[in-house]
Image (tube, rainbow, N blue to C red):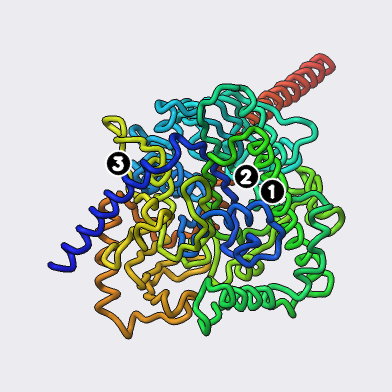
Amino acid sequence: MLRHLHSLALVAALAFLSEAQARELPEKPNIVILLIDDAALMDIGIYGGEAATPHIDALAGAGAMFTQYRSSPLCSPSRAMLLTGVDNHRTGISTIPEVLPPEHVGKPGYTMRLEPGVKTLAARLKPLGYRTLMTGKWHMGSGHGDLPDSHGFDRSFALDASGADNWEDKSYMPFYADAPWYEDGKAAALPEDFYSSAFIVDKMLDYLGEDTSDAPFLAYLGFQALHIPVQAPPEFTANYLDTYRDGWQALQTRRWQRAQEIGLVPAGSAQPAFHPDLRSWDDLSENQQRLFAARMAVNAGMLEAMDHHIGRLIDHLKAKGVYENTVFVVTSDNGPEPSSAEDPRFETWLRANGYHTGIERIGEKGSYGFIGPEFASAASSPSYLFKFFVSEGGLRVPLIISGPGIAPARIDAFALVTDVTPTLLDMVSAGPAPEGSVSIDGRSLLPVLSGAAPAVYTHEDAVGIEVSGNAALYKGPWKITRNLAPWGDGHWRLFNLETDPGETQDLSAAYPDILDTLQADYAAYAARVGVLEVPAGYNSVLQVEKNMTAAVLKRAMPKIIAFSIGGLILLGGLIWLFYNILRNRKKKAINNAS
């Protein structure tokens, strides 16, 4: 009881300190959110990665660098949580349409759109006098009223898909007929000289230049880097052509060692496992090794290219004299992408759509790059697994918050993707949400950023995450995970992350009472937010294939119907023709006989 009262008192104190610190910040700072797609914890230079990211590194050096931040394992749920502060199930975007089983279609929390009452950060800031601007990937609802212009953004140039080509205006997978780009809710085309990172920044600079008033702004940039297809200008890729030639196991070891050196994990922490279904680097031919090393070079080049264009945005803000009063948030939506294009069926689609997967002009227009599950597993080191799954490799990603009122610091306190929006609202003293709004689940990190408190979560707080059957719950040093096929078996496992951040030792048998307690906490979380259990035997990879096939057939159905009708008409015509030929022959035979 005393421990419970202590926790309540701490929460109340943090709330008071949060409000007090918000009042000390400059009035209405500008806000820039830079969202990387599929970046691992250690991809950014300052987190120990190989890619040169000097502009992001400078933001981290001037502000707060979080080391224990968690997101969701998939893009749309993470974006919904990031921009609303609400658990993904309560936003309506529990998962992504590509992996949604038919049993969940249209159910509350699974409508794949921001549901009524869910307010974005833009919708909250706009009444406070903010200009609200968005460029890049959206992927949070595609029907009428679902795009950024209907959710608080004054100007937007948005990709309503999980990804797209980075050089051309075209789709990257059969699920989409094309690359659905929209400007202010209306279908839009891309320029001839398009490259995603350059264009996303260019368009934001255009929007920022439209208003010469002193009104504060929110700028949300959803980059396509590092989502597949991995593509980058050759001058950036060239910087890394020799970096990954010793393979994925060597990269995993290097990052694990580096993580200990810079304190991302305790010294002596066990090296994360390499899933037994993953290939060994030595099993590849020399040509295959060269190709995969080049793909990883493009991946690093793509990140450096993005950082380069972020530098252009920063230079613009400095030139306009608004940089010093701008809060920057830099993060990733989830861990690295394991998907590949090594399926012969997919390769047929790629060829039909002008793609190749070879080493020639790799990363350039027409090249379809991917790092695959092996390099994704290596990139996620010192964590286990990758995107889609709730092991640390899918959830533990970078977070940087920099700007006025934020002293340079490294923050090792636990934080969650839903905490970003309430933190930013706290910074601008936004006040209570409009009546009828869905309540925020996250907590303001302002007490941690200001140094007023060491953490905003106590060891008694249970924090759940679930996406498409993959589920986890954090509580103090403990974590339980349940990963489904194809990279998991559906069993709950228990880990102590303080001593085993790589999730190498399942402690379920040693601590059954703790496992039971955390499972009960997860059940309470799932009931509160409305988690639906996936069908028996669910496999996200197989579900993607089913949904892609259904999407292709749906698009092709008018042609199939037209072809079928045409075929029937042709068949009927042939039958009529043959009938008349036979009838005429019969008449001729009768006439000849008479």
Residue 525: name its quadrant: bottom left
Q: Secondary structure at mark 3?
A: loop
Q: Which mark is residue 306?
A: 1
Where residue 320 sits: x, y (%)?
64, 32
* Classed neighbour count for the residue bearing mark 3: other residues with Cα under 10 Å, few (<14), some (14–19), many (≥20): some
> Mark 3 is on which residue type?
Ser
Q: Earlier in the sequence, mark 2 or mark 3?
A: 2
Which quadrant does the N terminus fall into? Answer: bottom left
Q: Amino acid at mark 2?
A: Phe
Is residue 306 in view from this perspective? yes
Q: Residue at x 61, y 61 (%)?
A: 338
Residue at left offset 31%, top offset 44%? 19
Q: Camera-side residue: 342 or 450?
A: 450
Contact (Cβ within 8 Å) of mark 1 with mark 2 = yes
* Mark 1, secondary structure of its residue: helix
Residue drawn at point x = 56 percent, y = 26 percent: 155
Which of the image's four quarters has the C terminus?
top right
Q: CA distance from mark 1 to mark 2?
A: 8 Å
Nearest the viewer among 60 and 349 is: 60
Q: Position of residue 135 (x, y in %)?
A: 60, 35
Circles 3 and 1: CB atoms closer than 8 Å: no
* Residue 553 disc label: none
Q: On screen, 353 above or below 43?
A: above
Q: Alpha-carbon neighbours of circle 2 within 10 Å: few (<14), some, or many (≥20)? A: many
Sequence order check: which comes first, mark 3 or mark 1?
Answer: 1
The residue that label 2 is drawn on is 223
Residue 439: which numbered mark, if any?
Answer: 3
- Can residue 561 be seen here? no
Residue 328: x and y, percent?
54, 45
